[in-house]
Image (tube, helix red, strand yellow):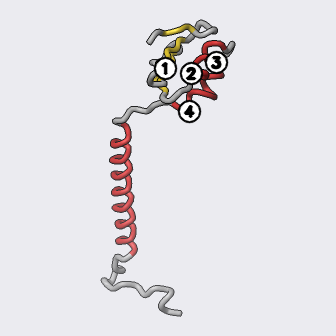
Amino acid sequence: MDWAALKSKRGRAAYDAETRELHVKFPGSQPVKHADIPQHVYQNLLETDDPHFYYKYYIAPSRVTPGRRRPFSVVSYGLKLVFLLIACSLLTANDLDPGRDGTFEASELSSN
């Protein structure tokens, strides 16, 4: 896979026709891999006068995310849920504390 300069001279792109993977590199950033990109999209990127605009609106949404990230995210959401449930149970337990004389206060709903 060979890297080609974009028209703006501030970026490079490489395309693998067999796997339909596109790699794009702009100054100051790491190369980004994109999956299932048609060859005409790669050709348009090379020929456009504004590759940043073309990339942002036509290619960037197909960015491939690392596979390791998803399990960490699930664990993170699981921990957040556990902490939320603990906080809710503590708040509920505080509402049921007995009054100063050791007895529970009558609810306003039961007095009606």
Q: CA distance from mark 2 to mark 3?
A: 9 Å
N-terminal of the two: label 2 or label 3? 2
Do tag 1 and tag 2 residues touch (Cβ < 8 Å)? yes
Q: Could you tell me the amino acid type at mark 3? A: Asn
- Percent position (x, y) of residue 56? 61, 26
Q: CA distance from mark 2 to mark 4?
A: 16 Å
> Based on the displayed image, in which of its 4 quarters is residue 5 positioned?
top right
Residue at left offset 61%, top offset 13%: 46
Q: Could you tell me the amino acid type at mark 4? A: Pro
Q: Residues within 10 Å of mark 1 (few under 14, many from 20)?
A: some
Which residue is tagged 2? 39
N-terminal of the two: label 1 or label 3? 1
Quadrant placement of the N terminus: top left
Q: Which secondary structure lies at badge 1?
A: loop
Q: CA distance from mark 1 to mark 3?
A: 15 Å
Do tag 2 and tag 3 residues touch (Cβ < 8 Å)? no
Label number found at residue 44? 3
Which residue is tagged 1? 17
Q: Could you tell me the amino acid type at mark 1? A: Ala
